Amino acid sequence: MHVFVTGASGFIGSAVVRELRAAGHGVVGLARSDASAAALTQAGAEVVRGDLTRPETLAPGVARADAVIHLAFDHDFSKLADNCANEQRAIEALGDALVGTSKLLVVTSGTGLVSAAGRPSTEDDAPRPGGAFPRVPERAAEAVAQRGVRVAIVRLPQVHDTRRAGLVSFVIEVARQKGFVGYVGEGTNHWSAAHVTDVARLYRLAVEKGDAARYHAVGEEGVRLRAIADVVGKGLGLPVRSIPPAEAPGYFGWMAHLATEDLRSSSDKTRAALGWEPKGPGLIEDLAKLEWV
C-alpha cells in the first residue's frame, strides 16, 4: 500500500518511513523545506510540499495514499498553544480529505495525555480533557471519527535512541541551563518509554492491520525519574538534586506537571492485538550512550 506520512522527515517519522519502505510499502511524505524534501527522496519516498500551518496542503498527500499516519508536530514549546491549534486544524483537514473513503487515519497522541490514577494507563483509558496542557489530538480525532472516518490512535511514551530521548531531551536542556539535574521529591514517579525502531514497527503494524483502535507504543512501562536524573547527571557531569514540588514550575517550566506525575503505561492489549514485541534497548541504556556533545 501507499502511506501518507506527516512529520516524515522528523525523528520518529524518518524511522517510520524506513520501516514502511523496508516492508515494501510506498510512502508519500509531507515536507516543508528543501532539506526535508531531499531527505525523503533519498529515503525512497514521494514528496508533497506543505506544513501544518497550511492545512489545505495536506489533501494532495491523502489523495495519493491508501492510509495516513499523522506524526507532525512543532515542538517549539514557546509557542505551545499555537502549535496545538495547528495540530487540531491539521487533523480536521485530514478528516475532510478522508470523509467518504475507507482509508485509515492514524493520529499520534501521548501516554502522558491519558487519565489514570494510581495505576498504569491502558489503551481503554480516556484522554485528559485538556486544561493546563492544551494538546488534545484525540479530541480532534474523535470529531473526525464521528464523521465516518476510520481512525486509529497511537499513544507515544518517551521515544529514544542514542541521539534523542523524548522529554528527556528537554530535561537535558534545562539541566544545562540551571547547572544541575533536578527531580521532584524522591524521584519515585515514572515515565514510560520505547525505542524508536520499536515505535516505527508499531506504526507499520497498525496500518497493515487497519483497525480503528487505540495503541500504546510502550516498551518499558515505567522508568523512575530519579534513575533518569542520575544517568543525565553523569553524562553532563552535573550534580543531581531533589527539588520540592513547589519549585518544579520554576525549574521545569512548561513540563513541570509532567515531571511531577507518575506516567506509567501498559501496552498489553497493543501487543496482543498487533503481535508487537519491543526489542530495542531500554531508556537508561540509551541515555548512558547518548551523544552528549
Image: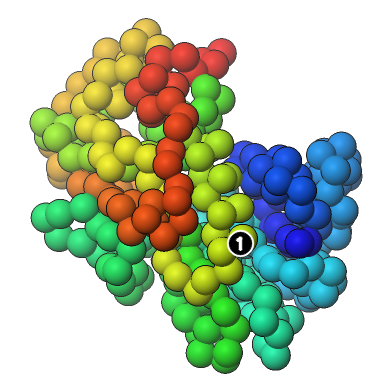
Q: Residue at x 81, y 39 (%)?
A: 43
Q: Residue at x 40, y 33 (%)?
A: 168
- In the image, residue 290 above or below residue 165: above
Q: Quadrant of the C terminus?
A: top right
Task: Specify whether 117 is left or right of 217.
Answer: left
Q: Which residue is mark 1?
A: 207
Judging from the image, what secondary structure is the residue with disc 1 in?
helix
In which quarter of the view is residue 151 placed? bottom right
Q: Residue at x 68, y 87 (%)?
A: 99
Q: Residue at x 43, y 25 (%)?
A: 281
Q: Amino acid at mark 1?
A: Val
| Front position in the image: 128 or 22 | 22
| Front position in the image: 75 or 200 | 200
- In the image, residue 11 above or below residue 80: above
How far across and how far down the image is residue 39, in percent?
82, 39
Could one spot residue 121 in this view of the protein? yes
How far across and how far down the image is residue 288, in percent?
40, 15
- In the image, residue 232 above or below residue 100: above
In which quarter of the view is residue 87 placed? bottom right
In which quarter of the view is residue 92 placed? bottom right
Q: Quadrant of the N terminus?
A: bottom right
Could one spot residue 155 in this view of the protein? no
